[in-house]
Every structure is written in C-alpha cells, then in structure tokens.
Image (tube, rainbow, N blue to C red):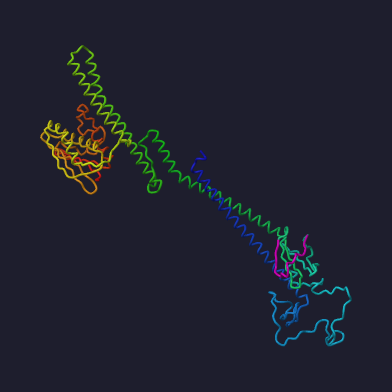
Amino acid sequence: MFPHSLRWRLQLWLAFLLIGLLTGFGAVVWELRRVQQFNQLDEELQRRVVALSGALRGDAPGPPPFGGRGEAGEFVRGGKGPPPDGRREPPPDGWKEPPSFGGRRDGPDGERGGKGPPARPPGEDRGGPFGRRDIQLSAEVVALFDATATNAFFFALYSRSGEAMKQSAAPPAGMAQPTRAGNDTSIHKRTRDEWREAWHFTELGECVLVGRAVTGDLRELRAFGWNLFAAGSAVLILGLGVGWWVTTRAIQPIEEISAAAGRISAGNLAERITTSDPENELGRLAGVLNSTFARLEAAFAQQKQFTADAAHELRTPLAVLISEAQTALTRERTTAEYRDTVQECLAVAQQMRRLTESLLDLSRFDAGHAPVAKLPVDLAALASETLTLVQPLAEQRSVRLALDPDDAHCLGDAQRLRQVLTNLLTNAITYNRPGGEVRVHTSATASHVLLEIRDTGQGIAPEDLPHLFERFYRADKSRTGADGHAGLGLAICKAIVEAHGGTIGVTSQPGIGSTFSVRLPAV
C-alpha cells in the first residue's frame, strides 16, 4: 500500500523539495561565510604587506626629499619612493641633474666640494637595494606581528637576490620566496597547506611575504557548517511534520469519499457523501458524486420495478396459455373446440411477442444501439397516413379524427416516427369518450417542428403526469395487461423522440382532455 498511497507520495515530494531547497540555501550561506571570512583575512594580510613594504622603502636609499631622479633616471617628487601607481612625472622647470656618486663634489675627500665617497675594496658587500641589509621595523609594525596573539601573523623580507633579510621568530616550515612574474608589483595571495599568504615585490625587486595559519578559520567554518546542518535538519523535520498534517487534512475528504463509495458498492445505495465545505473543489466533487449515486439508486430501483413489472406482464399471458393447454388435454374435444383453443393461445402469444418486442426496443435505445435514420420527413403527410391507419379503431370507439396540417419538415426515421404517432393516436382514441374528438396539428418554426395531438377524453390526474412516460406505469390503475396494453407505449415514444434529438411532453385537465406535444429539430 505504501507505494500507492497518495499521502506518502506527497510526503516524499515534499521531502525532496525541502532537502533540495535547504541544501542549496545552506551551501550558499556557507560559501558566503567562507568568502567573507577569507576576505577579512586577506584584508589583514594586505594591510600588513603595505606596512612592511613602507618600512622596507623607508630603509632603502631613495630620491631627494623634494624630488629627483628615480632608478631609471625619471623624475620623482619628494618622498622615499615612486608613487604607488608607478607613474613617473617630468622634472619641474629649472631642475638640474645632481652629480653622480662617482663625480667630484666640493671637497677632495668626498665632503662638500669633493669627488664623492671613497672607493670600497673589491668583493665587499655594498648593501643598499641589491644585497642583504639590516631592516629596522617601527614599534607599530612589530605590533602587527605579535607572536603571543591568537592567530599570529608571520612575515619574511627577501632581498633582490632572494636572501631573507628579516623574518618572524618562528616562521612556518617550507616558507620560501614566491616567484616574480616580470615587473609585477601588485599584491598576490595564495593558500599553502594550512597557511594563507600574501606577497608583494617592490620596485627594487625585494619581496614582502606575510601569512597566517588558517587552521582556526577552517575549524570555525566546519563548526558553522555543522550548525547549518543541524538547523536544516530541524527545519526539515518541522516541515515534514507540518506537511504530514496538511496532507492528512487534505486527503481526509478523499478517504471519506472512497469509504462512502465502498459502502455504496456493497449495496447501500442510499449512502451519501457528507462534506463540510460544499463550495471547494472536493465539496463540488462530492456533490457530483452524490447526484450520480442518486441517479444510480433511481436506476437500480427502476430496474427492479421494471423486472417486477415485466414478470407480472408476462405471467398473465403465460397463465392463459397454460390454462388453455391444460383444458384442451383434459378430455377429447371437437375440431372446432381445438380451433378455438389454438386461436386463444395464438392471441396470447401475439400479445407476448408485442411485449417482448417493446422490451427489446427499450433495451436497444438504452444501450444506444437502436438504428435511427436521418432522412427528410414531411411530418404533416406522415400524420395523415397514420390517421388513415387508425381510422377503423376510431370508428369502433365512435371518435372523430381531425388534422390541421402545416408544413413541418424534419430529419428522422419515418418508420420510428410513425410508431410514435400510432401509439399516441391509439391512446387518444382508447381513453377518449364516445363521440369525442382527436385533433392532430403540425407546425414549424425556424428551429423545430411541432406535432400536437389533442383529445377530449377523461384527462390525466396531476399526480400521474410526472410518471406518465415511465415503463409499465398506468395512470388508470384499474386497467391491467389483459387489455393488451403493457404500459410501455409512452416509454417507447419518449425513447424514439429523444433518439431524434427532440422532446415530448403532456398537458392535461381532468374531465376536459389531454394534449401530447412532440418537438423535433427542423431541417
């Protein structure tokens, strides 16, 4: 039952939807937290790289305080290095090239007026921007690399030749100068094992490397991820619980409908579906099913009544047949007596044949298998022919027949429509008073044709009118099937007219007469 349960299917779809949404939301939140945390770390690393780079420039010889030539001879304004963006500016008007270190100045010994500093012995390290030199860091810069602080930063300063000029007290294992790409002086970042590092090459080719362990950051991210997982699991459980409650409430009317349908299928045709809100979708469905069950109950009741009536109608002629046969066999009879017995049995058999044919016609119409042709029919001419056929019966009953013919052309089966006219005229003559009248009137409009049969008979009681076209129903309860009428004629007329797409109705006034009206679609 589990794979076929609508409640479990809805619950599984809800679970998949919640898991997908929570997983996507958690992944986005965790990634944003990771990016934010590493962005903050990178900002701290960059701030320290800038500080060390400034200290490194301050310790190196640079241009004059108020401007001078840089490394490549470009003019640079006052300060200890070129502008951060590396742009060079032209020298101001009137600026003169200062004497080189090798030129003569004011004094003979390199003092003012001399020839420059004395020459150093070959092989001695000149220091300066190209070799190892002693770097002094200010207290503010040293405070940025306090080894006692949590998540302490480390650093290393490399000369242009790649030699470490200064570094932290306990640098991490494997720390080395990064490789420089061309003359790039921007700040770069990388993650190496459990370290996050940032480095920068100065204009002189020296390297500033700053880093920090990210073990604690990764631990915090893992803890944050587990918290997200726990929160998502709680939301998932809560959502599934609410979803189970909602689906249970939504499925309950369907289960009630199913239970009621099961009780009805078990034979309780009077069972109906109760609903708290008849205006919603399930309420409207329950209303449709209730009306269907009502029609089903009526159909079963009609079937039972039909079976009982058919058995009753067949029982009378069968009893006559059996009685006549037994009487003929009790003693020897003359030829004339045997002939009378056989004729009586034949008349009863003809009555049974008409009854069975009527029942077969109704069953065919009920199943939709009765053939109905759709050919042009002149209803006025057809009424005139039928009046001629029933004229002997009218004369026998002393009933006068009249016809008011107007053009009334329709599409239909002439044989079936003649059967309708014959049944209606026979009833109008049979239930009319002696010396009465039956008048037939035909007319047509743009949409339909009308056939009316009026009689001056005894009329029909108002309580009998709604049941007049039901099978085996007789308005005159005193009449039985012994008179040759089984109560199926009007039911057959209704079936034929409805098969043509028309309608049939009756109006009556007791003691005055009745009028049967047949409407059929016009050509």
Decide whether residue 61 is among the magenta residues.
no
Dominant SS of magenta comes to: loop
Quarter of the image for residue 306 reads top left
State left or right for residue 467 relative to residue 70.
left
Between 495 and 197, the residue placed more toward the observer is 495
Q: Where does the image place residue 341, in percent across and percent down from the top left?
A: 20, 18
The C terminus, quarter of image: top left
Q: Which residues are magenta?
A: 174-190
Q: Where does the image place residue 487, in percent across and percent down from the top left?
A: 23, 32
For the point 58% across and 50% down, the residue is 233
Q: Where does the image place residue 100, in percent across and percent down from the top left?
A: 80, 82
Q: Height in image: 82 above or below 434?
A: below
Between 201 and 410, the residue placed more toward the observer is 410
State left or right for residue 82 relative to residue 293.
right
Quarter of the image for residue 478 reads top left
For the point 28% across and 27% down, the residue is 311
